[in-house]
Amino acid sequence: MPRRPASHALLLSALLFAPLPVAAQDLSASIAADGLAATEAELAALPTPTEADRFALGGLRFLRAVETTYQTRWRTGLDDPSGMVPLLRLEQGVSPAASSSPGDVSALFAQVATDMASARAPLAGLSEGPEFSVEIRLADLWFDVNADGTRTPDEDLMQLLGPTLMGWRWFDRDPAAPAPVIRFDRADAAWLSAYTHLLEGTAKIILAYDPTDAITRAASARTAMQAISPPYAEEIFVIRPWVDALWVMLDALDQQPDAARLAQARDHFLAMIADNRAFWTAVEKETDNDAEWLPNARQTSALGLTLPPETGLTWLAVLADGEALLKGEKLIPYWRLGDGGGVNLARMFTDPAPIDVKDWIQGTGALPYLEQGATVSADSWQRFEAMMGGDAMLMSVWLN
């Protein structure tokens, strides 16, 4: 038998032992071994991605946005004592050498907006196309919080986001039980797209009311007061974070916002509602029951959460009320007006002005947006609350 030239042997070895592209591997295992960034880069480089590849790429970019937020907060120590700002309220560690500047909040949410648009791009049309599936073991997912490339137990997704995903059930779970396995499918592409719109819209609002100046002045005031006299311990660890966060929020709102960004935020929220409708239309047609993420009435979720049969219709009624408000078709009731008048929320996005909370409470600030017309009722939300019992807020986060 003739011997192969050495060059042939080298080529054969390279083909046999070269890493397989992600599409040919177990995607979940690739994330576990290599992390989100490396796996996302491999998927993005595929020349002819399948529908499953495109969904996986969108999902990985979404998770990378969360990871990038964790890394920014590790580096800067950014936090939200009020618990009201998405992404800033997620629990995580902080570097002992953390150092922040007033522009970090705006920079973080500018990156979130960019990342959400990038995550949404490969999802276009998937919810209306052929069926596909992408299986993910939640135990394989982790966020490189300190950006050192090495996985530690406290960086596991279930440790960081378990309470957010499962609510009170997280604390009643069997710690030895394996983490859920999710099989995402065609309908879930619309759900993920809706979530990218929700977070990008939220980021646009924060950028429209840029808090950089307020943060700068709060920091200057702290420094000046500390020069007069050292603060007492309760002020540093308990009182100051809440007072400063509240003041920054109120001061940032009381400035002329960026009208273009607010208009974009409104468009994203309307697109979120449209994607939600597409999701419930697609999921209602499913006949399988295989490791579902968000199930229809005939399915069960791999997370162990059971949805009442009318969940989809009831949640869509809540979103329909939100859509009517965003379009100015219904008004928000105002405490100084009776039936037949309220606040036009749509005009607050399309014709914005500074928001002085004391003026809004008294009415002077609200007056430019007060109109005659039908107001939205609380009936849809109350039906949703009654259906979900004590899980209404958890479910609203899950359903987006």
Image: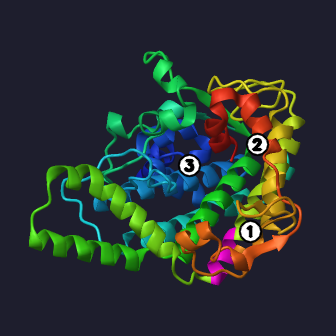
- Badge 2 crowding class, 10 Å Cα cut-off, few under 14, some 14 to 19, many 20 or more, is some
Magenta stretch containing residue 263, yes or no? yes
Question: Label 1 belongs to which residue?
Answer: 345
Task: Estimate the spatial distance between the alpha carbons at disc 3 and disc 2, rounded to whole Å.
Answer: 46 Å
Q: Work out whether residue 172 or residue 135 is closer to the camera in this orientation and state it.
A: 172
Question: Label 2 belongs to which residue?
Answer: 381
Q: Is mark 2 on a helix, strand or loop?
A: helix
For the residue marked with disc 3, what is the amino acid?
Answer: Pro
The image shows residue 314 at horizontal and vertical percentages of 83, 39
For the residue marked with disc 2, what is the amino acid?
Answer: Trp
Q: Is mark 1 on a helix, strand or loop?
A: helix
Q: Is residue 147 left or right of residue 280?
A: left
Q: What element carries label 3?
A: loop
Residue at the spot x=31%, y=46% of the render? Answer: 93
Q: Work out whether residue 70 or residue 248 is closer to the camera in this orientation and state it.
A: 248
Q: Is residue 127 above or below residue 261?
A: above
Image depth: mark 3 or mark 2 in front:
2
The image shows residue 348 at horizontal and vertical percentages of 70, 74
Q: Work out whether residue 14 or residue 244 is closer to the camera in this orientation and state it.
A: 244
Question: Label 3 belongs to which residue?
Answer: 21
Tag shown at residue 312: none
Q: Give the range drawn in magenta.
A: 259-265
- Badge 1 crowding class, 10 Å Cα cut-off, few under 14, some 14 to 19, many 20 or more, is many
